[in-house]
Amino acid sequence: MNQTGRLSRTTRPRRYELLITPDLDASTFSGEVVVALEMSEPTDTIVLHAKGLDVALVELSQGGAPVAADLRIDAEREYIVITAQQPLLAGDAILELQFDGPISNGLFGFYRSTYLDEAGAERVLAATQFEAAHARCAFPCFDEPEFKAMFAITLVVADGLLALSNGPEIDREKLPDGNVRVRFGTTIPISTYLVAWVVGPLEVTEPVDACGVAVRVAHVPGRGHLTQFALDVGAFAIEFFEDYYGIAYPGEKCDLVALPDFSFGAMENLGCVTFRETRLLLDPDAATLDETTGAALTIVHEIAHMWFGDLVTMKWWNGIWLNEAFATFMQHLGIDAYKPEWKTWDEFALARAAALDVDALENTRTVEYEVVTPQDADGMFDLLTYQKGGSVLRMLERWLGADAFRAGVRHYLSRYQLSNTETTDLWDALEEATGRPVRRIMDTWIFQPGFPTVRVGEGRLEQRRFCYSGAGHDERWVLPVLARIHTGESVETRSLLTDAEVVPLEVPDGSLVVLNAGGEGFYRVAYPTAWRDRLLDAGVLQPLERFALVDDLWASVLAGDATAAEFLECARRFAGETDPVVWRAVVGHLRTASRLVEGEALERMRIEIAAIVKPATKRLGWDGHSDDARTRQLRGLLVNVLGSTTFDPETIARAREIHEHAEGADADVQAAAISVVASNGTADDFERFVARATETTNPQEQMRYLYSLAEFPSEELVLRAADLALSDEIRAQNGPFVIQRALRNREHGAVVWAFVRDSWPRVLARFSPSLIPRVVEGTTWLVEDGLPDDVLKFVAAHPVPSGARTIAQHMERLRVHRAAVERERDRFSAALLQAP
Ligand code: BES
Ligand code: ZN
């Protein structure tokens, strides 16, 4: 042990033989572990982790001879301490322990999950979720990522249950008591957080071959018809990454396991990847493009980790961001190769925008920061890790060139395979492969909070940190700026790397200059209004550049540098837009802008939005069968806006008809119809939607109905949705998201807030701590007079330790929104009411 609470590096595990015997009925398990240790120095003390386990020492031995020792439990530090009566020599030793523990009711460690079978009876399974530091809840171990070891796992389970773990099944033996002992092949050295097993009444598909790797999908019975998609994407991903990384898949097989209860989206356990059902089981003919890419990106993300994360692993939890940012980058690269027509990098613009949005807060953080306890690492699973981290990697890849970037990644993976790294090891490998100053660039993005806005003026560019608060900050970035200059017919692209505050930019008179050309930089651009209008008029902007222009303008409204009326004026220019991603920015921000006003002005705003959206819906019509997937996605979005934001009677009637009768409508329209019917729905509709959410075996359809419950127009129904979300009717993995949506309900958010506030003990008891911030996230538009103070006071009085930073961000965002309301309410209302 040392001051930071990390285990000593002088005693290391080499191999664990682990036997686990779960009792699903009693919700307990027992286990035995034999750890082969290697000591670089003589010692009489061995410290490892265990939490909530009853542990007994079986034997400590060295050179085949037992060594007398005792075991002490240090529950507070989650340690077990073994003290030998005489020092062990440097070299090998064997530690054998026995333990029992509870199968957890939460979603971490070795935990319990249930589903109802066809007869309506509850069936129980149990699965593991160990990241960041929960392996210690399931077996005594050196629970830090640097202690990689081989795992030989054995499960003793009731006959007839499916048993899976990281390695392939290599032996199965029926025991006299009727149970079955299943042995799995020994893994390569991996960190404890990547160990996994699953036991329960599940089914598994036949394997599909990908470069000699068997890919299977495990699922609850009755969902086999939803597995083909994942098998296809999974096999593609393995082939894609073997080629991209230039290294064979590091596991011996690849099971993709859909669990009915799961805290996150998915988890990259080597060879035994676990998922929430919506992210794995999917009927491609019945899913929207968002649902489809959501699942595909998740599968590819986790498979990308098999190399980046599992084969090469961060030394300590401060490196989690790179692990996740890289997989986020890779999920898009992989899917871009799988289905180029999905334009997943364009879709990524939404993720980048979300990251820019948090990173403009005073409560943002640096991407990488010092992590002392593993709990500090929990604060890393957020937009700044995934979306900002992924965006700056994309910006870097664009800057270096795709081939050069890949060469650096290959160099890094082959050099560090089976071991652990620091963040800088990747930058150094990229520098070696490209000769470019990668570390110098990246340090400014990773170790400084925020990002710059680039202001353009005559003959110069200026970078300054962008903050909603307007506070002065003096950070500078090593900023790769791409500019495109249109002079008459000629087009010139310039790329400059600058860390100066002001840079000259000479351009010929009369030319048009596009900054952040390509739209993939992690910065904003502040154009003078006339310049922006000229770019739009000239039609020289690519989709992601138009997206960035709209998003940057809305951000400057929130910062108080532009007005909402100016934004609306600009949005009107997009009535002829055809790109779905651009539409998402336009529509998303128009919906948000409508939050700034009330009453008659709100009615006007709805008319304005309808006027912008209607021509596009007319062009698209209702029948999507001959359209490509993105056009169908766009239709769904626009139908949704007309039916649930502007309440267009014709759209509402049509949506209801489609919901009741048109089995044939495409998935995007059907999904939009559910939301439109809910937004205009009755108590009867509510009952039917609850029933549909419960009965369907299609995970995506289930989520559509569940989330729509928060959109109903009556206070009573929205409150019922929130109440259901706190009950057993809605799984605890989904409840926080339902409440978040109910809090966002335009009409009834305030009442839902009062309910949530008064039910806080129920909220805390029902949801895992990591999901509490999701509830609070719903409050950021509770801007009515007096409400922000109530929220801020309550949240300050009820701190949530696992999400302090994220919650501070939500609260700051609420203040930013309230300030925007105060600035805009009168003047934007006046502008709307004056409009012809
Ligand atoms: N390793 C993470 C899952 C995780 C998150 C474990 C937080 C422990 C704490 C996994 O690779 C991941 O990133 N999952 C994402 C899905 C992905 C598509 C962004 C998730 O769960 O949201
Ligand atoms: Zn990940």
Image (cartoon, helix red, strand yellow):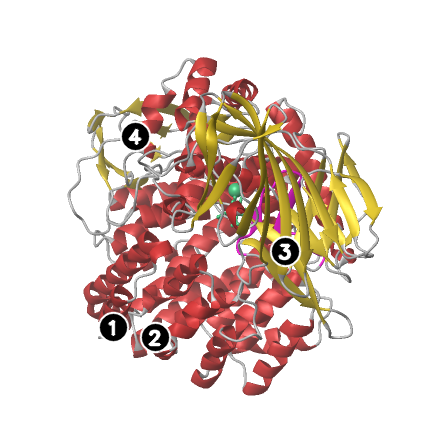
Inspect this view and state whether residue 610 appears: no
Q: Mark 3 near mark 1, Cβ–Cβ under 8 Å?
A: no
Mark 2: give few (<14), some (14-19) or many (20+) Cα within 10 Å: some
Residue type, label 2: Arg
Q: Are marks 1 and 2 in contact (CB under 8 Å)?
A: yes
Q: Quadrant of residue 246?
A: top right
Task: Give the image location of residue 642, x and y in percent.
Answer: 49, 69
Dot 4 falls on a residue whose secondary structure is helix
Ligand 1 within 8 Å of the CB at mark 2: no
Is label 1's Cβ within 8 Å of ligand 1? no
Label number found at residue 444: 4
Q: Which label's residue is closer to the chain start, 2 or 4? A: 4
Amino acid marked by disc 4:
Thr
Name the residue nearer the viewer: 173 or 563: 173
From the viewer's side, name the closer residue of 457 and 475. Answer: 475
In the figure, is residue 373 to the left or right of 151?
left
Q: Is residue 273 magenta?
A: yes
Task: Please tell me which of labels 1 and 2 falls first in the chain.
Answer: 2
Q: Which mark is residue 790?
A: 1
| Place of residue 337 in the rendered image (x, y in percent of width and height, measured from the top left) | 63, 35
Give the mark nearest the N terminus, 4 or 1. 4
Question: Label 2 belongs to which residue?
Answer: 757
Q: Residues within 10 Å of mark 1 (few under 14, many from 20)?
A: some
Label 1, label 2: how far apart the Cα atoms are? 10 Å
Magenta span of residues:
263-285
Q: Residue 784 appears at what percent x and percent y?
A: 27, 74
Mark 3 lies on a secondary structure that is strand
Q: Nearer the viewer, mark 1 or mark 2?
A: 2
